[in-house]
Image (tube, rainbow, N blue to C red):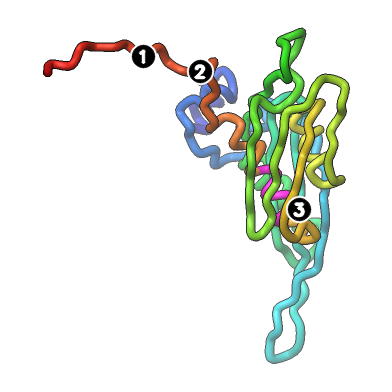
Amino acid sequence: LGRLVKDMKIKSLEEIYLFSLPIKEFEIIDLFLGPALKDEVLKIMPVQKQTRAGQRTRFKAFVAIGDYNGHIGLGVKCSKEVATAIRGAIILAKLSIVPVRRGYWGNKISKPHTVPCKVTGRCGSVLVRLIPAPRGTGIVSAPVPKKLLTMAGIDDCYTSARGCTATLGNFAKATFDAISKTYSYLTPDLWKETVFIKSPY
C-alpha cells in the first residue's frame, strides 16, 4: 500500500477506506492529511509491573489525532519514557485514523455538522452514545469525548455515557468506537432500491 501511495496510484484516503485496507505505515497518513492533522495528548498515566526487584514503571500515553474535518484516530502506547510513549501513540493514532460520517439534524441546510444517526460505542464497561443535535448546540459532553468529537469535525452533538467513565482509556476508546461506527451504520439514504421479482411459485 505504501508503494502505491508513493507512486500516486492512490489519490486519497477515501480510496483506502473504500476497500477497507489496513493502513500499516503512518507515512501514508502524513502524505494525505499531513499539515491538517492536530494531535492532543489526552492523558499520560504511569503503569507498574511488579518484578522481583520492585516495581517497573512505564508510561502509557493516550493520544487523539484529527484534522477537524472528518478524520479521527486514537492511539495508546506504553513505553519507559514519556516522550517515546507519546511518539509511539501518535504513530498508532495515525494508523488507526477512520473517516467520520457527518449528517444533519432535521433539515439539510449547508454543511453536515452532526452525527448522521444515534450511534453507540463501548469499551470495557463504558458505553458512549452519540445523538444528533440541532445546529449551534455545540458538543454537549464530557471533556474527553468533546476533544475527540471536535477533532473529528463534528460541531453539534449530544452525548450520554454509561459505566466507569473515569477510566480515561476506555472512555476515549468507546467514543472512538462510536465515531467509527458512523460509517458502518446503514441509513435510509443509502438503501439500495429493491427490485421486486415475481417468485416462481
Residue sitting at x 81%, y 64%: 45
Q: Where residue 140 sits in the image (x, y, percent)? A: 85, 36
Where is mark 1, residue-wise?
194
Q: Work out whether residue 35 can be spotted.
A: no
Instruction: Please tell me which residue lies in front, 106 or 21.
Output: 106
Q: Where residue 37 sits in the image (x, y, percent)? A: 77, 31
Magenta span dominant secondary structure: helix
Identify whether 114 is placed above or below 171.
Answer: above
| Nearest to viewer (mark 2 / mark 1) | 1
Q: Few, some or many C-alpha atoms within 10 Å of disc 3 (few <14, some 14-19, many ≥20)?
A: many
* Residue 49 figure quarter: bottom right
Where is mark 3, residue-wise?
62
User: Which segment is the magenta one?
Assistant: 170-176
The count of marks equals 3
Q: Earlier in the sequence, mark 3 or mark 2?
A: 3
Q: Distance of mark 2 from mark 1, alpha carbons? A: 12 Å
Identify whether 1 is placed above or below 43.
Answer: above
